[in-house]
Amino acid sequence: MEGVSKQVEQLTKCNDLSMSSMHSEYPSQCLPTKLKPPSGDKAKKAMYECIDLNMYEDQANMVAFRIMSERLAFWIKSLHILYYDHYGKLPQYVVNWYDEPKDWCKKSGGNRAICIELSTKDDDPLMYKITFFLNTGLIKAQGKAKDKFASHDFHVLKALTDKIIDYNNNCINTDNGSPCTADEVSETSDINSNSTKVGNYNENQMTAVKQIATSDKTETQTQGESCIQTDLDNYRAVAQFKPEQLFETNGKKTLSKL
């Protein structure tokens, strides 16, 4: 998926990967450390960072997957970079980012979600809506262009999330736990491949089902690859990275929403 790799490389070079910008809108104390199981029967079957294109009927126009609690903050950061910083600055797109309920970071308890609507400036604008359920770690994308999300944007987000984790994990000072700041941002593509990846999935353990489907082409190419669900106990054993170490801002840029 050469197109995905090139876009991820561009996004990592052009954006701040440090987590300090997350502190204002989504501080660590607002994010759950233990996730609840999804309520829907099909949502419970959703795999971890892997999309099953056959889980929902075609008329639902929806795909879904789950993430682990250790990766919540990093996925929010990845979503912000792709939709707010990238699509939101392109003239042909409109991005609407909001929380449900409003200002849930300032309240305690209840279900919490981040919603992102990606639209175009034509007669039928909404391409798809992403709903990120923070309490369960379920992310769903629904709309006429859900195939675009499943075949491209999902893979960009997943790879970008791993880059963000790599960057912040390598920047942490082991002596005092100080996070990276915006001034210390560098190209993450040069990070030594032998560096420890905390919270990343091994590509040999899980391969996403890919369906190549673009909005401007009528021909769809399906690449069926087996989805292998990662052993969750092994995943938790390596996911010892503590996101709360990354939320010290010292006056750095804060995350803003449309």
Image: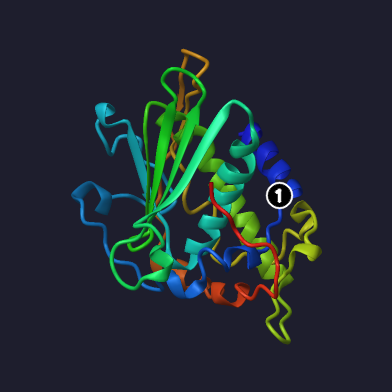
Which x, y percent locates residue 80?
57, 50
Please state which amino acid type lies under the numbered disc 1: Thr
Image height check: is 175 above or below 219? below
Report the side of 52 relative to 78 (left or right): left
Residue that sits furthest to the top in the current view: 218
Which x, y percent locates residue 99?
41, 54
Residue located beneath label 1 in the image: 12
> Viewer-proximal residue, 150 or 195?
150
> Viewer-proximal residue, 87 or 104?
104
Residue that sits furthest to the bottom in the current view: 175
Who's the residue at 44% across and 50% down the image? 98
Which x, y percent locates residue 69?
43, 66
Who's the residue at 73% across and 79% down the image? 173
Q: Can residue 201 be seen by looking at this rendering?
A: no
Q: Residues within 10 Å of mark 1 (few under 14, many from 20)?
A: many
Who's the residue at 38% across and 64% down the image? 104
